[in-house]
Amino acid sequence: MKPNDIYDLVIIGGGINGTGIARDAAGRGLKVLLAESHDLASATSSASTKLIHGGLRYLEYFEFRLVSEALAEREVLLSIAPHIVWPLEFVLPHERHLRPAWMIRAGLFLYDHLGARAFGLGASRSSLPKSRGVKLAADGYGAGLKPEFEKGFVYFDCWVDDARLVVLNARSAAQHGATILTRTRCTGARRENGAWTVALEGGGAVRSVTARALVNAAGPWVKSLLEHELNVQSPGKVRLVKGSHIVVPRIHDRRHAYILQNPDRRIVFLIPYEREFTLVGTTDVPVSEREGRPEISTAEVAYLCEAASRYTGRAVIPEAVVWSYSGVRALYDDGSADPSAVTRDYHLMLDTGGENGGDAGGAPLVSVFGGKITTYRRLAEHVLDNLSRWFPESRPWTHAEPLPGGDFGDADFDGLLTDFKRRHPKLLVQWLARLLRRHGLLAAAILGDAKTEADLGENFGGGLFEAELRYLVANEWARDAADVLWRRTKCGLHMSAAQRSRVAQFMHDAGHMGEAA
Ligand SMILES: Cc1cc2nc3c(=O)[nH]c(=O)nc-3n(C[C@H](O)[C@H](O)[C@H](O)COP(=O)(O)OP(=O)(O)OC[C@H]3O[C@@H](n4cnc5c(N)ncnc54)[C@H](O)[C@@H]3O)c2cc1C
């Protein structure tokens, strides 16, 4: 890169918000550069509960704007990313002493109707079924639960592969001309001659680029980036709240998830995960930025096991935990005392260099505070609205163009799988389904004309073959074993330690970093 490269927009942070903004801006014709200090989705955006949801519980906090926007986004994301987003049915076992039935019914009624209204549809045309009351055992919804839970409610939200959503946004941004730099840290930026001069450090080199506008999408680091690297005073405050999940052997073999009420009024999800497992989460633990990479504590494991075991027939015990992950929510600080009550809505702060956030007509900076995976696409549109004074010609477009691999046309997932099975009859259908879930139509680029497993190169175990690994390196910025085992895929969960080491060795030998399996 030349020292004086000039961009319309430089985005700092390669989580869902940074990559979503990069995609939107690049597709509007802006010259975009995104810098991510580690891997894409290496922070909060791979550590979520992985729901595209309105957030039923946010209704208790009267977050109607957020819930409406999120429910509308559920429909949009289902249509632009059908490979990595799909409907998931939730069962809420009823416990009268925690929340009365009328309250739950009213909440679900509102939930059903807010989404339809926000999308501009009649309720009958929403693509997901409406909520209803059920008898757990009789209707097949009590699997894995204690028999004493007799009644409940079911409703639909959606599941998403969060890390892949980030990567596909980055890929789409790149297809629209954006430059995506991973392992590249923004070490400073200052306003000069009506533009930003941005210092980037990566691959052992320091470089400087010029940007007409800057976006701070650094997630949990949003405030510290402002104060330290950008030297900008902002009234926006952020609350950092850690959330952890545990993964245990599956507690039932049905497709539905559970949403469980806890006596502390929080809710905990039990979600079918990677076929053989159940994902249990999450917690809300206030943290500070100094604490470094978030990790689950023994107290959090105990809390999640206890919350699950109140309901499950067989106790969920800490010894059964096969994997865990933690992320830090960067919540916009609305002054709530309870971390669960802090708003999950996002706030954008536009700074043009004036005193106390006033407009001095300087090069703009938009900082992203808070947000959900679910609302990233609308958030990106709002960021570009904020910048419309500088880029007036641009128009929203991301609701209509499928993400890479997601252009299913009139077909559905099962139809595509049938087609792939026909083209590759000797490959295991379960594996083809997993590949199609990760890559959608782009799975064809990995499979080529492979007839048997041997045509896919080395078999690393856990469903990962050399053909896919090489594809991830060539097309998805994968550089080390963690990138491929825990973010681009979850194959690490299905491998032994020795198999994960072999992947690390392969990445190393192929000239990448190899470590961190
Ligand atoms: C436990 C938990 C559960 C959640 N569940 C859900 C859910 O089910 N559904 C939902 O919609 N949302 C959920 N969320 C919220 C969602 O995960 C976050 O809102 C979202 O991931 C935030 O994305 P981001 O891009 O803002 O931040 P991040 O993903 O954290 O990305 C910020 C990036 O900036 C980079 N960065 C920082 N400083 C620099 C620098 N100086 N130079 C370059 N790069 C830098 C970081 O490396 C990082 O990758 C959950 C969050 C948590 C923690």
Image: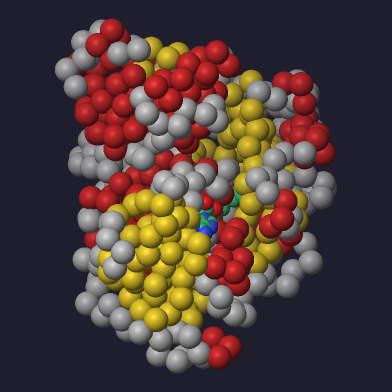
Instruction: Tell me where residue 224 sits by quadrant.
Output: bottom right
Residue 341 is left or right of residue 208, and the answer is right
Task: Tell me which residue sits at (72%, 39%) in the image.
Answer: 296
Tell which of 499 and 315 is nearer to you.
Answer: 499
Color style of the picture = secondary structure
Residue 279 is left or right of residue 95, and the answer is left
Q: Quadrant of the N terminus?
A: bottom left
Looking at the picture, how far across and down is residue 7, in whole percent? 29, 68
Task: Tell me which residue sits at (36%, 79%) in the image.
Answer: 195
Q: Quadrant of the C terminus?
A: top right
Looking at the picture, how far across and down is residue 99, in whole percent? 76, 51
Tell which of 54 and 472 is nearer to you.
Answer: 472
Looking at the picture, how far across and down is residue 288, in whole percent? 73, 58
Looking at the picture, how far across and down is residue 135, in whole percent? 64, 33
Image: 138 above or below 456: below
Q: Is residue 89 visible in the rendered structure shown here?
A: yes
Task: Tell me which residue sits at (26%, 25%) in the image.
Answer: 446
Tell which of 81 and 471 is nearer to you.
Answer: 471
Tell which of 64 and 180 is nearer to you.
Answer: 180
Task: Tell me which residue sits at (48%, 85%) in the image.
Answer: 353
Image: 361 above or below 112: below
Instruction: Tell me where residue 118 sits by quadrant.
Output: bottom left
Residue 252 is left or right of residue 480, and the answer is right
